[in-house]
Structure formats: structure tokens, C-alpha cells
């Protein structure tokens, strides 16, 4: 029996409970679900309910960028020993207005593509790379396996797909 050592306080996601075959399907599902909602509610998706809360489009942009960022980290982990990596800087991206001009329909396509590309990349990496380690800085600095990093991508997509549902009241 697997023991879950780490769990998200907000959504209950347990990184150690994720199997490699879960990654592609579940990320694809979460990205497609959030993309469909953003596309369907395109006007509402652009609106912040409060100045402190991101819009559904901002969450969607974040989800897309997280997958590209983590995808690159997984490649680094596979080919380099102790690679250095740059953080995503998710909050500054929003604060700098980098997502202000993203159109919901275009974003939805990009989200689906990011999910598919991430899944294909993860599936293509050698299974032996799943145990390679890397210094990962979020949510706390720790040495993480590539499998944990892939599970983190899944957590980000599922958690934020839930945020999109909540924001759009669906």
C-alpha cells in the first residue's frame, strides 16, 4: 500500500498516489475542461470578480505556461545532472499584464495544445528518467523526482481547472 506523504491542503491532491499512466489522460482532461469553459463563457472569462482574484483567462494562461515550464524542466532533468532552472514567476506574469491581450478562443486552443504536448513529452521520456532528481522550488524548495514534477503539473492543471469552474460558476 502506498503512503501519501504530501497532500494539498486545499484540494486533497496526493503526489505519491499518481501513477505514470495517469499523467497524460488526466492533464488532457483538465486542460480540455478548462479550455471548453473559457471558450463557452468567453466574456465572463475575461472579468475578475475582485481585484485580488484572477480571471478565468488569467488562470488559463497560467495553466498553459505552467505546462510549458514544467515540460522544459522534465527535459532538463532527463539530460543534465543537477540542472539549474528558472522559476515560472506566475504572479509577476499576471501583475505585469502579460495575459491582458489573450483572447479566450485562442487561449483555449493553446491550452489544449499545451496539455497534449506535455502528455506526449512525458510519455516519450524514458521510464528510467522518472526517478531522476531535481531541485524544485515550489511549493517549497526540495529535491524532487521527475515523476513528482509530472504529478505537480497534474496538480496544477486539476486544481486550476477547479478554480476556473468556480470563477465561471459552472
Image: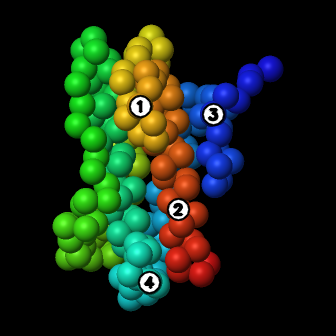
Vertically, is 128 above or below 100? Answer: above
Mark 2 Cα-neighbour bin, 10 Å: few <14, some 14–19, many ≥20: many
The alpha-carbon separation of the residues under discs 4 and 2 comes to 19 Å
Question: In this rendering, would 99 be left or right of 133?
Answer: left
The image shows residue 34 at horizontal and vertical percentages of 49, 65
Res 50 label? 4
Q: Residue at x 53, y 46 (%)?
A: 155
Q: CA distance from mark 3 to mark 2?
A: 21 Å
> Is label 2 in contact with label 1 (beta carbons under 8 Å)?
no
Element type at mark 4: loop
Q: Nearer the viewer, mark 4 or mark 2?
A: 4
Q: Which residue is mark 1?
A: 141
Mark 2 lies on a secondary structure that is helix
Counting residues from the start of the chain, the first of labels 4 and 3 encountered is 3
What residue is at 51 percent from the left and 44 percent from the top?
Answer: 154
Q: Nearer the viewer, residue 139 or 64?
A: 139
Amino acid at each position: 500500500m502506498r503512503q501519501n506523504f504530501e497532500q494539498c491542503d486545499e484540494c486533497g491532491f496526493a503526489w505519491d498516489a499518481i501513477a505514470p499512466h495517469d499523467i497524460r489522460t488526466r492533464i488532457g482532461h483538465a486542460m480540455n475542461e478548462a479550455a471548453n469553459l473559457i471558450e463557452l463563457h468567453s466574456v465572463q472569462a475575461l472579468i475578475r470578480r475582485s481585484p485580488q482574484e484572477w480571471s478565468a483567462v488569467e488562470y488559463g494562461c497560467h495553466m498553459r505556461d505552467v505546462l510549458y515550464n514544467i515540460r522544459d524542466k522534465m527535459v532538463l532533468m532527463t539530460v543534465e545532472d543537477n540542472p539549474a532552472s528558472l522559476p515560472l514567476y506566475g504572479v509577476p506574469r499576471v501583475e505585469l499584464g502579460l495575459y491582458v491581450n489573450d483572447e479566450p478562443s485562442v487561449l483555449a486552443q493553446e491550452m489544449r495544445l499545451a496539455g497534449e504536448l506535455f502528455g506526449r513529452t512525458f510519455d516519450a521520456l524514458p521510464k528510467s528518467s522518472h526517478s531522476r532528481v531535481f531541485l524544485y522550488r515550489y511549493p517549497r524548495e526540495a529535491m524532487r523526482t521527475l515523476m513528482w514534477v509530472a504529478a505537480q503539473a497534474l496538480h496544477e492543471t486539476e486544481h486550476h481547472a477547479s478554480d476556473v469552474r468556480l470563477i465561471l460558476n459552472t
